[in-house]
Image (tube, grey):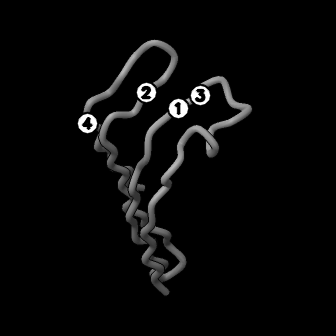
C-alpha cells in the first residue's frame, strides 16, 4: 500500500492557535507513506516562506522527515 499526500496550510496562525508556538504565515507539505511487508516507510516534507513566531522570522524553511 502507498499513500501520497500534498497540500497547503494557508494560515499557520489559525492552525497553531492555542499552542505555545504561535506561527504566522503559510506552508506547503508533500509526502509519501509506503507499507511494504508490514514495514512502514515515510518521506514527508514541509516548505514555507516568511514564517514568523514570537519576535523572530524565518525567511525560508524547508524540512524533510524520513522514517
Q: Is the residue 37 above or below the residue 32 in the image?
A: below
- Relative side of 38 to 19, left or right: left
Q: How far apart are marks 3 and 2 (CA)?
A: 8 Å
The residue most toward the right is 18
Compare marks 3 and 2 and give the one earlier in the sequence.
Answer: 3
Label 1–label 3 contact, CB within 8 A: yes
Q: What residue is shown with label 3?
A: 22
| Label ID, residue 23 | 1
Q: What residue is shown with label 4?
A: 60
Callout 2: 10 Å neighbours few (<14), some, many (20+)? some
- Relative side of 14 to 27, left or right: right
Q: Is the residue 48 above or below the residue 38 in the image?
A: above
Residue 52 percent location from the top left of the image: 43, 27
Q: How far apart are marks 2 and 4 (CA)?
A: 11 Å
| Label ID, residue 52 | 2
Classify mark 2: helix, strand or loop.
Answer: strand
- Relative side of 20 to 4, left or right: right
Q: How far apart are marks 1 and 2 (CA)?
A: 6 Å
Classify mark 4: helix, strand or loop.
Answer: strand
Q: Distance between the residues labelled 4 and 1?
A: 14 Å
Residue 65 percent location from the top left of the image: 38, 50
Amino acid at each position: 500500500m502507498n499513500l501520497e499526500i500534498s497540500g497547503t496550510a494557508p494560515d499557520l496562525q489559525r492552525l497553531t492557535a492555542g499552542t505555545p508556538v504561535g506561527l504566522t504565515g503559510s506552508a506547503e507539505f508533500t509526502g509519501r507513506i509506503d507499507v511494504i511487508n508490514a514495514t512502514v516507510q515515510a518521506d514527508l516534507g514541509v516548505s514555507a516562506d516568511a514564517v514568523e513566531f514570537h519576535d523572530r522570522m524565518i525567511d525560508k524553511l524547508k524540512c524533510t522527515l524520513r522514517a
